Every structure is written in C-alpha cells, then in structure tokens.
Image (tube, helix red, strand yellow):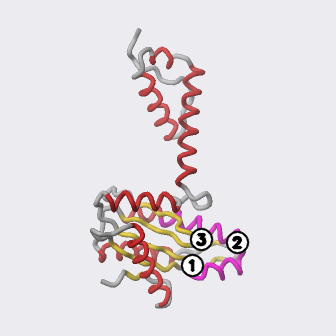
Amino acid sequence: MSDKITEIPIQIEKPFQREAAKEANETIASIPGGTAVLSNPDLGAEILTKYEKAEELKAENVRDPLTGAFNRRFLDQQLEHKLQSGQKISLIMVDVDHFKEFNDTYGHKNGDRLLIELVRTLSARLRLTRLNGEKDFIARYGGEEFAIILSNLNDPDIAENVAENLRQMIANLKFNIDEKTKVEKTVSMGVAVSRDTDTPENLVVRADKALYIAKDNGRNRVETEPV
C-alpha cells in the first residue's frame, strides 16, 4: 500500500475548505490504513463536510451574529488568557456617539447597518495600522459599544495614537442612508494599558472610565486613563 496522501477528489474553492481538506488528509493519513480511506470520494466529501461544519460552529460560538465582530465571551476569554500569561496589551473601548438619536431618526435597520460598517472599517484599519503581524481584534461589548485589544502593546502614547487614527478615520466617513442622504458619524474612545497586577475586570473598568471622560469632554475624541 502506498503511503502517498491522496487528495480528496472534490472541488475546493474557499481557503478554509482547502485548510479543512488538508487537515482531514493529514489526520486520516496518520491512521493505519488511512490512505486507503482517502481514495474513497464519498468518505472524503463527508469528512470535509464535517470539518466545514465544525468551522462554522466555531465561528458562531465566538462571533457576534450581527456585526461579525468577536463576541463578549470571546473577549473575556482573550483578556483572561493574555493577562494570566503575562502579555502586555492595551484595551480600547469604543462607543458610537448619539447612537439612540441615529436609530430614532433613521430607523433600527440603518442602525444595524451602521454597526456592521463600523466593525468592517475598524477591522480593516487595524490591519493597516499594525503591520507587525500582531493579532489585534475587535469585539462587540454590548449594544453600540465595542472593545479593541492591541496585542503586545502597553505603551499609552502608542495605543492612544492607534486609537486616534481609528477615530479620525470614522469621523471622515460618510454613511449612506439612501441615494440622497449621507450621514457623518463619530465615536468616542477610552484607552487603558495593562499592568502586572491587572485582572480583565480592572482593565475594562479603567478603559471604560477613560471612555466616559471622552464622552463628558464633548465626544468624538480619545482619552487615555489618567496615570
């Protein structure tokens, strides 16, 4: 019997499908007689489907269903993991300014669209801002409030600069209500950097306090926790 891994003979179009197929092949090939199983198209397709379903369930468990941002549970887990392992991080709390008034004026459907667009824009900009390959991410904290973790960064000046870049980008956007109506929207941000004795709760509280300072000082601004 040949030890060569046989490719699953079905069309694979999406990157995650290719990864799932590769993982399936590697897993089965490690089992005695596994390469024979890979020659069966039906079994191969079934295996790939199971991997795809697992990926979908995994995404559903960590993603906010509306915006696609990570959910609050995943945020809490990441904060706990990073702080317990001694990683230096910064936390940015983000709040959409006057979101209730936006919903009252343009409707909840447009409010949902705004949150979706906000997450997409912030996520794209984070990748541009942090070119060193760090895994920063945005999570929906609740309602119109979001949290951004900046990995391996606890310099308050740099973290504030990242937040300011994000804020300016949002402020310069025009949100399309319809063909004739375009609306500007702003966000307020609070920044806190991790300390050696931090718990997730402590870090969130400090970032939240900075956020409320930004809101009290007129909104559409970034504030960093007082030293």
As helix, strand or loop, the secondary structure at mark 3 comes to loop
| Magenta residues (range) | 97-122
Residue type, mark 3 in image: Gly
Q: Disc number at residue 35?
A: none
- Residue 149: % across, % down: 40, 65
Between label 1 and label 2, give the one nearer the viewer. 2
Q: Quadrant of residue 135?
A: bottom left
Relative to residue 74, is residue 221 depicted above or below?
below
Please name the residue shown 52% across and 68% down the image.
Answer: 141
Please name the residue shown 46% across and 37% down the image.
Answer: 19
Q: Nearer the viewer, residue 162 or 75?
A: 75
**Would residue 113 appear left or right of 15 to someone viewing this image?**
right
Relative to residue 67, is residue 4 depicted above or below?
above
- For disc 1, the marked residue is 185
**Residue at mark 1 to residue at mark 2: CA–CA distance:** 15 Å
Tell me if residue 203 can be seen: yes
Residue type, mark 2 in image: His
**Would residue 185 appear left or right of 213 to someone viewing this image?**
right
Circles 2 and 3 in contact, beta carbons < 8 Å: no
- Residue 203: % across, % down: 38, 72
- For disc 2, the marked residue is 108
- For disc 3, the marked residue is 143
- Image quadrant in which the N terminus is located: top left
Tell me if residue 164 can be seen: no
Residue farthest toward the top in the current orientation of the protein: 1
Residue type, mark 1 in image: Lys
- Image quadrant in which the C terminus is located: bottom left
